[in-house]
Image (cartoon, rainbow, N blue to C red):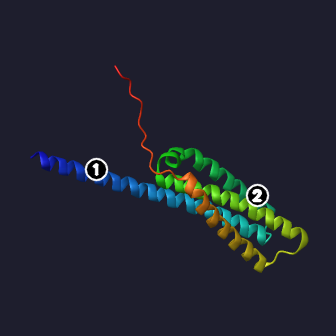
Amino acid sequence: MQKKINKQQLTAKKAELAIANLQDLKKQIFISLWIFCNIIALLIGLYFQISIFLISGISILLISSLLFLGHNYRDFFRYRDRGQRTYCLLVSMSISVIVTLGCAWYFIEKYTMDTEWGLLFIFGFLFFAFTLFNSLSATMVKGNIVFRKKTSQK
């Protein structure tokens, strides 16, 4: 009888872990794709020189999304392995887009930006983000951290 209860508890605990992992995966996919799509829209808008109001709107949306997601999911970023990887990805994409925009601005000062150069800068952004993520993840990702509330001892 005792073994059946332990097996049932173990099965329930495994089910809870599977649900938590699925929820973490959905959070990770949502955050990563939302920020990635905003960055790509910003880069495409800048390279094709569309309306300055649309570019400003995308920039404001990107910055506010980073701030909102950072505040809303701070425990996810801090304590979960997936969250730490997502945070590392956001940091590497943010640094990469700043460097890419700096290089593109320097390039535009001397030459004209056309679609071939725009695609080259977008692929450069992707390569730099990938390289930066691989180098930063070794130091930023620590694994799952158990969050325990302090209990008063009597």
What amino acid is at disc 2?
Ser
Secondary structure category for the residue under label 2: helix
Secondary structure category for the residue under label 1: helix
Label count reads 2
Q: From the viewer's side, name the closer residue of 69 and 121.
A: 121
Identify which residue is drawn at 42% across, 55% down. Answer: 23
Please give the residue where the numbered disc 2 appears in the rendered image. 56
Image coords of residue 83 (percent x, y) = 51, 52
Image coords of residue 28 (percent x, y) = 50, 58
Identify which residue is drawn at 59% across, 60% down. Answer: 34
Looking at the image, can residue 54 be seen? no
Please give the residue where the numbered disc 1 appears in the rendered image. 13
* Res. 119 image quadrant: bottom right
Image coords of residue 147 (percent x, y) = 43, 40
What amino acid is at disc 1?
Lys
Image coords of residue 41 (percent x, y) = 68, 66
Q: Is residue 17 above or below residue 43?
A: above
Question: From the image, which quarter does the C terminus lie in?
Answer: top left
Looking at the image, can residue 92 be seen? yes
- Disc 2 or 1, which lies upstream in sequence? 1
Identify which residue is drawn at 38% across, 52% down. Answer: 20
- Marks 2 and 1, how far apart at CA: 48 Å
* Res. 108 image quadrant: bottom right
**Within 10 Å of the Cα at label 2, are there few (<14), some (14-19), or many (20+) other Cα atoms?**
few
**Within 10 Å of the Cα at label 1, are there few (<14), some (14-19), or many (20+) other Cα atoms?**
few
Q: Is residue 152 above or below residue 18?
A: above
The disc placed on residue 130 is none
Q: From the viewer's side, name the closer residue of 35 and 21.
A: 21
Q: Check if mark 2's residue and mark 1's residue have beta carbons within 8 Å.
A: no
